Image (cartoon, rainbow, N blue to C red):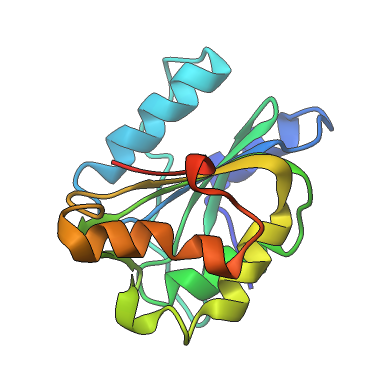
Amino acid sequence: TQSRSSAASDVYKRQDQTPVRQIIFVDPAVDNAEQIVQGLYGLISGKTEGLDGLLTKPSGDGPQVQVLRAHDTEIIVLDGRYDGVDQITQILGQHKDLAAVQIMSHGSAGSLTLGTATLGEGQLDTYKEQLRAWGDALSEDGDLLLYGCNVAAGKGGIAFVDSPVSYTHLTLPTIYSV
């Protein structure tokens, strides 16, 4: 089940029917997540005022993501109370031929934290079907961009960043980590 905050829902309803080409996922545990989302939305939409209070804390049962859309881009804030890999997989299952999927989360050498899930070298086999679905949502030249501190650090980080290649159609130059 997905819900949207009322402000985000109003913004979402006003958008034209331009096909989505890019999705930016934000884990709510990232420092300054609301400011990051406001900045991204302002940059994409050109709107800079009236963006306070866009994000609300989910309540109730089941994952509740918050979606903002501007032009061909969706910014989706995951529900930190649930497995973020599963949330991303469910959302990407509704899309094809995306130019980019960006994921902003906490990270450490060789892993990302997405909601209650840790996606690291030790969990990749567990999530291999989900990772394939992520690749299926991207176009042939689509990019998967991972943003998390130290994700690509050290040998474990390099192995982790290289690993989606074996589960998706993506090639190394299309997977980035910061």
Dividing the picture into quadrants, the one containing residue 42 is top left
Q: Quadrant of the N terminus?
A: bottom right
Q: Name the outermost residue toward the bottom.
A: 126
Which residue is rendered at x = 84% and y = 32% of the image? 17
Which residue is rendered at x = 32% and y = 35% of the image? 36
Across and down, in percent, residue 132 comes to 64, 69
Whether residue 19 sits left or right of residue 68 in the image: it is: right
- In this rendering, is residue 107 above or below 50? below
Across and down, in percent, residue 13 comes to 73, 38
Across and down, in percent, residue 117 comes to 36, 77
Q: Is residue 56 visible?
A: yes
Dividing the picture into quadrants, the one containing residue 118 is bottom left
- In this rendering, is residue 137 above or below 100? below
Q: Quadrant of the C terminus?
A: top left
Which residue is rendered at x = 62% and y = 61% of the image? 134
Dividing the picture into quadrants, the one containing residue 158 is bottom left
Q: Name the outermost residue toward the right.
A: 17
In front: 63, or 157?
A: 157
